[in-house]
Image (cartoon, rainbow, N blue to C red):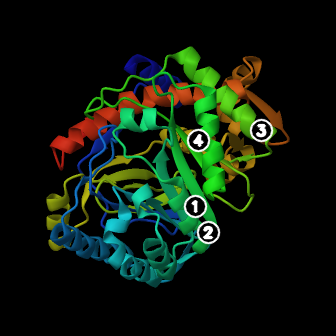
Amino acid sequence: MSVITTLTRMWLTKSFKPFTFKNEYDENLPIDECENLGLYIHIPFCKNICNFCPYCKVLYNEELCNDYVDALIQEIHLVCSSYKDKKNVTSLYFGGGTPVLAGNRLKEIISTINDYFTITEGIGIELHPENVNNETLNMLKEAGITKISIGIQSFNKKYQSILGRNEVNIEDIKSALNKVSFDTVSMDFIFALPGQKFEDLKEDVEKAVYAGANHIAIYPFIDFTFTNSNVKSLNKDEKRKLLDDITEYFNENKYIRSSIWTFSNNKNASYSSMTRDNFLGFGCSATTLLKKQFKINTFDIKSYCKRIEEKKLPTSLTIRFTKRQRMIYWLFWTAYSTKVNADDFKNFFGVSLEKIYGFELWLAKIFGLITRKNNIYEMTLKGAFYYHYYENFYTLSYIDKMWSIMRENPFPKDIKL
């Protein structure tokens, strides 16, 4: 798999130079040069560990969680206290783990963020289905949360069993959501599970809408090497048919597609922590993408807290981009939305998209992967699938390797991808 991603990297960057992450970082992060900046905060605690989940998390411990939040708030101060003026940011997303396990501290965390930033498009948080009750939702609303994303994965008992998840009571969820409203109610599902058919996904979507969702996320199952999952994904042809069928279902029902995996039946409902030009990440394993660099925090909670105690940033690795490398990052994450605006590329890099990648865009149109209207390139159904297919290679070749190393070593010397 790494051969495909390596050849793609060399072709698009016009260089044999790998992506090299080094054990270094800047004390002062240059965010003033960044437009369309978003924020992300990672809370790495769960009551139970799902065997398919690759993200940084540990079993919940109240004392450790409070120590972690203390450090998290201090990290925000360390990064932001040198900035003279409050900066507008698009959004703030809490992920995990199960962020509401630190629910009693959310208002404090958000207040700290508000000291340095003005959030223009709302605050989102990921929820376990067990969190969807009146008490928790009211607490979130009071803290300033405007968007919620519920990790259902599947309403189907068969797939709940495969994923090691408990049965979800859809009527309890519907009742709670009817009593406490949010701008976005997103529900996450996993597709490409063994034996999964279009009818299974369609039933999940219909149940989600019945329960109160106005935004649906359907993520592919990816078999990371370091998880304990023994679930095997569908093959390529089965995945493509499933993704095409569910996309056509959404199109027929007038849903708005906001990314490869996300669809909404309300134009104002949005939930995505990834489709931003630049973002700042706080907490264990959180990443930061700026104009000329990408950095990732340590995965180890004790090492994270120790670094903060020493008044040092908990950065584990940093890559300093060549211009071509940054273009690849920009295109990869922007394309997640299924559209690339050539004007945005020129504004970001000072050069036209066609001048840099005119041949590749021509090929993509010839092969039916994209269409162009004015200055916007949009993926076709075929293009969206092959983006997903390539992302799977990218995830297993790059992210899997990096996360595997960082789970074992809090501060590796370097990683070359």
Q: In the rendered structure, which amino acid carries the disc numbered 3?
A: Asn
Residue 371 placement: quadrant = top right
Q: CA distance from mark 4 to mark 1?
A: 14 Å
Q: N-terminal of the two: label 4 or label 1?
A: 1
Q: Is residue 416 visible?
A: no
The residue labelled by disc 4 is 204
Q: In the rendered structure, which amino acid carries the disc numbered 2?
A: Asn
Residue 75 placement: quadrant = bottom left
Q: CA distance from mark 4 to mark 3?
A: 17 Å
Q: CA distance from mark 2 to mark 4?
A: 19 Å
* Residue found 48% across the figure and 53% down from its top: 169
> Considering the numbered disc 2 on the image, is that residue within a helix, a strand or a loop?
helix
The residue labelled by disc 3 is 251
> Considering the numbered disc 1 on the image, is that residue within a helix, a strand or a loop?
helix
The residue labelled by disc 1 is 174
The label nearer to you, 1 versus 3, is 1
**Closer-to-camera residue (330/179):** 179
* Residue found 16% across the figure and 44% down from its top: 409
**Closer-to-camera residue (70/87):** 70
The residue labelled by disc 2 is 178
Q: Are marks 1 and 3 in contact (CB under 8 Å)?
A: no
Q: N-terminal of the two: label 2 or label 3?
A: 2
Q: CA distance from mark 1 to mark 2?
A: 6 Å
Q: CA distance from mark 2 to mark 3?
A: 27 Å
Tell me the quarter of the image containing the N terminus: top left
- Residue 404 in the image, given as x and y percentages of width and height: 24, 37
The label nearer to you, 4 versus 3, is 4
